[in-house]
């Protein structure tokens, strides 16, 4: 597989499963970075990278994809490292049930990639997302600005999708946010701030229909898992690329991400999803959204749920 060339930034994706492959595919189409795809399964990243590369003549991109299943040397000098490695959620399984196995996997990956890419922004997808983002921040030694978890980036796109479907409008005209823990029960879709071209959604939908959309958003991942008997991957990959593009191109996009809080929203020493300005250095700043009383209570419950996960980590 051809090595990445100087002149384009390099993005390394650790884990060539469904989400890692979708991320590489979406990212290649952007044409903004060369890509390294790694996995412990011999031949898997090589085959997937070659498959994506061969779509270049049709899709019109000419980035270079490198693949490895023998180590992490190819990831050296990456501008962004995306970690999707870990066991996926199966039907009936909660994200929290993954914590023991994925803790060991994430520690090993961090130990390998960080020394090779000291200036990289690290983006975590491994579940349970908030606990794994906290773990990555603690063991990596990187500043908090450069460790992000993909939580609300995915949950928000689901919220926007379901709102657009309910209202019969384009998703491009729907603006919404999801904060809090990346769990089915504890994420907090901010219905009070959702708009369609500036029009509050609360004026367009009944309270019952809006609550139904909020409930479906919370179960957005579980619904897919129940239907396909495996976790979703296409939207997750697209949401990761939205974050990667914001970093590489210094977009300063406002994206809900799981980040380490140090007094924001009245909380400290945990990672949880909040609105973040994402640019070249990763997190530029956290935006504190005005929450309704119900949303503030839901966020407090979400924080409590994450702290329960962190207690299991025993850091």
Image: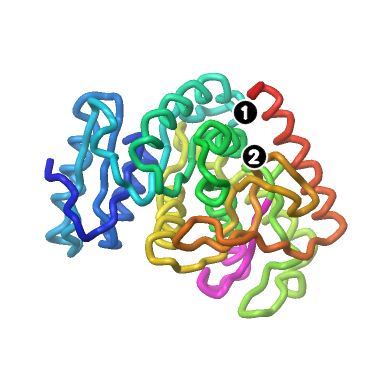
Q: Could you give the CA–CA distance between mark 2 and mark 1, rounded to whole angstroms? A: 8 Å
Picture residue at 67% right of the left edge, 43% below the top:
181
Give x and y (percent) for residue 13.
Answer: 34, 41
Residue 176 disc label: none
- In this view of the protein, which residue sits in the foreground, 287 or 47? 287
Picture residue at 43% right of the left edge, 59% below the top:
247
Picture residue at 52% right of the left edge, 66% below the top:
253
Residue 226 seen in this snapshot: no
* Local crowd size for mark 1, using a 10 Å CA cut-off: few (<14), some (14–19), many (≥20): some
The residue indicated by pointer 2 is 183
Give x and y (percent) for residue 234.
Answer: 40, 49
In the depicted structure, whether residue 235 falls above or below residue 41: below
- In this view of the protein, which residue sits in the foreground, 126 or 203? 126
Give x and y (percent) for residue 151.
Answer: 57, 47
Residue at the farthest right position? 293
Residue range corresponding to the magenta coloring: 163-179
The answer to whether mark 2 and mark 1 are in CB contact below 8 A is yes
Give x and y (percent) for residue 189.
Answer: 69, 55
- In this view of the protein, which residue sits in the foreground, 1 or 109? 109
Q: Quadrant for the C terminus, please.
A: top right
Q: Quadrant for the N terminus, please.
A: top left
Picture residue at 48% right of the left edge, 26% below the top:
107
Residue 49 seen in this snapshot: yes
The residue indicated by pointer 1 is 96
Residue 177 on the magenta span: yes
Q: Earlier in the sequence, mark 2 or mark 1?
A: 1
């Amino acid at each position: 597989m051809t090595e990445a060339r100087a002149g384009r930034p390099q993005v390394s994706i650790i884990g060539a499963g469904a989400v890692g492959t979708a991320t590489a595919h979406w990212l290649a189409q952007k044409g903004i970075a060369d890509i390294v795809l790694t996995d412990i399964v011999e031949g898997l990243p090589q085959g997937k990278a070659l498959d994506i590369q061969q779509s270049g003549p049709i899709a019109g991109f000419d980035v270079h994809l490198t693949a490895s299943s023998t180590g992490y040397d190819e990831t050296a000098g990456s501008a962004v490292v995306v970690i999707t490695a870990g066991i996926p959620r199966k039907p009936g399984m909660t994200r929290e049930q993954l914590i023991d196995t994925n803790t060991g996997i994430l520690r090993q990956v961090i130990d390998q990639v960080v020394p090779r890419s000291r200036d990289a922004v690290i983006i975590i997808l491994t579940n349970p997302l908030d606990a794994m983002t906290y773990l990555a921040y603690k063991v990596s030694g990187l500043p908090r600005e450069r460790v992000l978890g993909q939580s609300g980036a995915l949950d928000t796109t689901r919220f926007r999708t379901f709102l657009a479907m309910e209202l019969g409008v384009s998703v491009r005209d729907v603006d919404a946010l999801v904060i809090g823990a990346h769990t089915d029960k504890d994420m907090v879709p901010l219905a009070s701030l959702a708009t369609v071209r500036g029009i509050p959604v609360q004026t367009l939908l009944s309270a019952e229909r809006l609550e139904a959309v909020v409930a479906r958003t919370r179960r957005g991942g579980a619904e897919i898992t129940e239907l396909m008997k495996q976790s979703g991957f296409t939207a997750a990959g697209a949401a990761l690329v939205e974050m990667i593009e914001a970093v590489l191109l210094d977009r300063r996009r406002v994206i809900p991400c799981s980040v380490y809080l140090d007094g924001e929203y009245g909380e400290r020493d945990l990672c949880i999803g909040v609105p973040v300005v994402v640019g070249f250095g990763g997190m530029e700043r956290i935006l504190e959204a005005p929450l309704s009383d119900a949303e503030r209570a839901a966020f407090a419950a979400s924080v409590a749920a994450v702290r329960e996960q962190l207690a299991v980590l025993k850091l």
